[in-house]
Amino acid sequence: MVGQHAEGKLDNGVAKVVCAAKAVGGDIEVVVFATAGAAVAGQAAAIEGVTKALHVDRAENEHPLAAVLAPQVVALAKAGGYTHVLAAGNTFGKDLLPRVAALLDVQQVSDVMAVHSTTSFDRPIYAGNAIVTVEAMAAPCVVATVRLASFQAAGTAGAAAPVEAVSTDAQLPAHTRFVSLAAQKSERPDLQSATRVVSGGRALGSAEKFKEVMEPLADKLGAAIGASRAAVDSGYCASDMQVGQTGKIIAPELYVACGISGAIQHLAGIKDARTIVAINKDPDAPIFEVADFGLVGDLFQLVPEFAQKA
Amino acid sequence: MKALVSVKRVVDYNVRIQVKPDGSGVATDGVKMSMNPFDEIAMEEAVRLKEKGVVSEIVAVTVGSAKCVETLRTALAFGADRAIHVVEEGEVQPLVAAKALVAVCGKENPDLFLLGKQAIDDDANQTGQMVAALLDRPQATFASKVEIAGTKATVTREVDAGLQTIEIDLPAVITVDLRLNEPRYLKLPDIMKAKRKPVENTTLGDLGVQAAGGLKIVKTASPAARSKGVMVKTVDELIAGLKNKGLL
Ligand SMILES: Cc1cc2nc3c(=O)[nH]c(=O)nc-3n(C[C@H](O)[C@H](O)[C@H](O)COP(=O)(O)OP(=O)(O)OC[C@H]3O[C@@H](n4cnc5c(N)ncnc54)[C@H](O)[C@@H]3O)c2cc1C
Ligand SMILES: Nc1ncnc2c1ncn2[C@@H]1O[C@H](COP(=O)(O)O)[C@@H](O)[C@H]1O
C-alpha cells in the first residue's frame, strides 16, 4: 500500500485502504515516500492490521509527484514480490497508481468497493449507476485503488508494527517539477472524512450568500461544507469542495443538500451517505428521490431556521 | 507545435442508463451516444491553443468500433485538422487504449497529448497516466489551467487539498478537468466542413497492440436502491425526524 501524507501527517484514507487490504488477506505493508519519513511511517505502523511500515527517504520525495513516485513504487513492487499494490481512490492514488500499473503492464482496478477474493472485486461504473464484478489477473500482481467511501477506517493496533527504512535504485525523472500548492485552510472537518456534510448548489446565487447561508448551519452541526459542480463553476466556493462523480465521493452519517437539484453526477458522490436531507423549492427535484427527509421551500428561509433550531 | 487529442464515444451524460436484466452489461442499443464530456474540454483547449498560435496542428484519435467515427467527426468539427481511427470492435480497456495511443504517438510525435481525466462510462481515470508512463514523459492530470511557454508547460491541477501547480517539460501528457474551459457550441458550417477532413483508419494489429488480457467482467448489477424517505412540512418536523434517528 502506498500511504499518502502531508505536513507530517498520514492521510485519513490510509486506514480505510488498510481495511480493504485486510479483506484481501495476507501481510499488509504500507510505504511512505518522504524526505524523512520515519515519523509518518510510524503513524502507519500504528494502524491495526499493518504488518510493517516502510519509508523511502529521498530529497525528490518532498512533494507527491506521480512521475517521481511511480518508478520507486514499481522498483519496490518488483523486488518485494507483492501480490497487490493498493492506494486510496483519491486524487493522490488516481494520479499515481495507473502510472505504476502501466509500468508493471497490469490493467488497474479503479475504485474497489467490495472485495470477494484476492482477485475478484466490485467497482462502480456510469457514476455508480451500475456495479461490475471484475476478475483481475493475479500475475504479476493486482493493482487497485480503493473507493474510500466503501470502507471503514481500521482501528489502532495494540502494538505498533515495525518501521523500516528502505531504498530503491529507481532512476527518477527531472521533467516534472512542483511549483506550489494553494490549499484551503479551514477549521472545519475534512470533507472526505466528516460525519456530517452540508452542501450548497447553484441556488445560493453568489459566493457571499453561499458563505452567509451555509456556514452557520455547518458551524451548528459541526459539519464540513460541500458543493455541487454548478456552485463551484459559478465561483461560489473552492473546487476541492465539489461532491460527485468527478469530485469527492463521501459517506457521511448526515448529508444536507441545499438548493441542489440532484443530477446523477452529484448523486454519485453521496450514495453512501447514511441519511440525506434535501431542501429545495421544486417538489419535483430529483434529489427528493434519494432523500430520507425532504423539505420543499425557499432555502434562504429554511436553512437559517434549521441552523438556529438544530 | 503538434497536439494529439484522444476522444472516446460514450453514452451521453444525460442518459439514465439501464443495467441489462441478465447482468451482461449496460443497455446501449438505441441509446444516445456522445463524445466523452472531458474530451470535449480537451478538444476545446487544443483549439484555443491553435487560435493563440501556440499549436499549429491538431490530430484527434479514437480507439473503438466503426461507429466511433461519429466522435471523430465531432472532433474535426471542433477544429481538429485530421483524425486517426484505431478500429476495434471489442471492448477496449484503459491499458489497451493507452498502448494503442502510445503507438500512435510513436508515429505522430505530438508535443502535447490532451486527454479527458476520466471517461464517464468506465469511470476508470487511468488512460492518460498510463500513456505518460509508457512514453516515460511527464503527466499533469486533472488540469484546470494550462500555460505553455516554449518547451515547458505550467499546469494547475485540481487535487483534494486544493490547487497544485507543476511545471513539466514537453512533450507531455495532460488530462483535463471540468473547469479548464467551457467547450464551444458546434456550428453547422463547421460540422459540414468536418465531413471533408481526412480520417485515417488503422487497427490494434497494425499498431502491434494485443487486445487480450485485462480485467474479466464477471457481471453487471444495479446498485442497491435507497429506501423511500419522507417529506416533512416544516423545519421543526425535520429536526424531530433527525433527533429520532439520533442524528441531532
Ligand atoms: C462530465 C460531468 C461531470 C459532472 N460531475 C459533477 C460532479 O462531480 N458533481 C456535481 O455536483 N455535478 C457534476 N456535474 C454537473 C451536474 O450534471 C449538474 O449540472 C450539477 O450537479 C447541478 O448543480 P446544482 O444542483 O447546484 O444546480 P441546478 O441543477 O441548477 O439546481 C439548482 C436547484 O436549486 C433549486 N432552487 C433554486 N432556488 C432555490 C431556493 N431559493 N430555495 C431552494 N431551492 C432552490 C432548484 O429547484 C434546483 O433544483 C457533472 C456534469 C458533467 C457533464
Ligand atoms: N478507447 C478510447 N479511445 C479514445 N480515447 C480514449 C479511449 N479510452 C480512454 N480514452 C481517453 O482517456 C481518457 C480517460 O479514460 P479512462 O481512463 O477510461 O477514464 C478519456 O477521456 C479519453 O480521452
Image (tube, coloured by chain):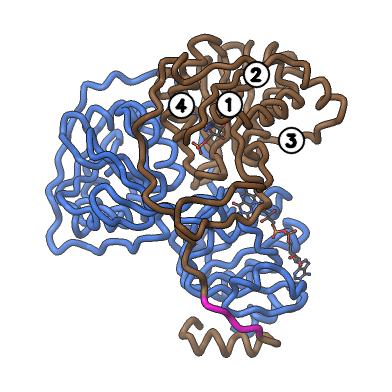
Chain colours: A blue, B brown
Of callouts 1 and 3, which one flags the residue occurring earlier in the amino acid sequence?
Answer: 1
Q: For the residue marked with disc 4, what is the amino acid?
A: Ala
Picture quadrant where residue A140 is located:
top left
Q: Write down the residue under mark 1.
A: B62
Question: Magenta span: helix, strand or loop, mainly?
Answer: loop
Determine the chain carrying the residue at label 2: B
Q: For the residue marked with disc 1, what is the amino acid?
A: Thr
Local secondary structure at mark 4: helix
Q: In the image, are marks 2 and 3 on the same chain?
A: yes
Q: Are marks 1 and 2 in contact (CB under 8 Å)?
A: yes
Question: Alpha carbon of mark 4 to alpha carbon of mark 1: how far?
Answer: 11 Å
Q: For the residue marked with disc 2, what is the amino acid?
A: Ala
Whether label 3 lies within 8 Å of ligand 1 gets the answer: no
Q: Do the residues labelled 3 and 4 touch (CB within 8 Å)?
A: no
Q: Residue B183 carries which label?
A: 3
Q: Do the residues labelled 1 and 3 touch (CB within 8 Å)?
A: no
Question: Alpha carbon of mark 1 to alpha carbon of mark 3: how far?
Answer: 19 Å
Q: Is residue A73 left or right of residue A248?
A: left
Q: In the image, are marks 2 and 4 on the same chain?
A: yes
On the rendered image, what quadrant is the N terminus of chain B found in? top right
In the image, which residues are magenta?
A: B227-231
Question: Alpha carbon of mark 1 to alpha carbon of mark 2: how far?
Answer: 8 Å
Q: Is residue B85 at least partly visible in the picture?
A: yes
Question: Alpha carbon of mark 3 to alpha carbon of mark 4: how far?
Answer: 24 Å
Determine the chain carrying the residue at label 3: B
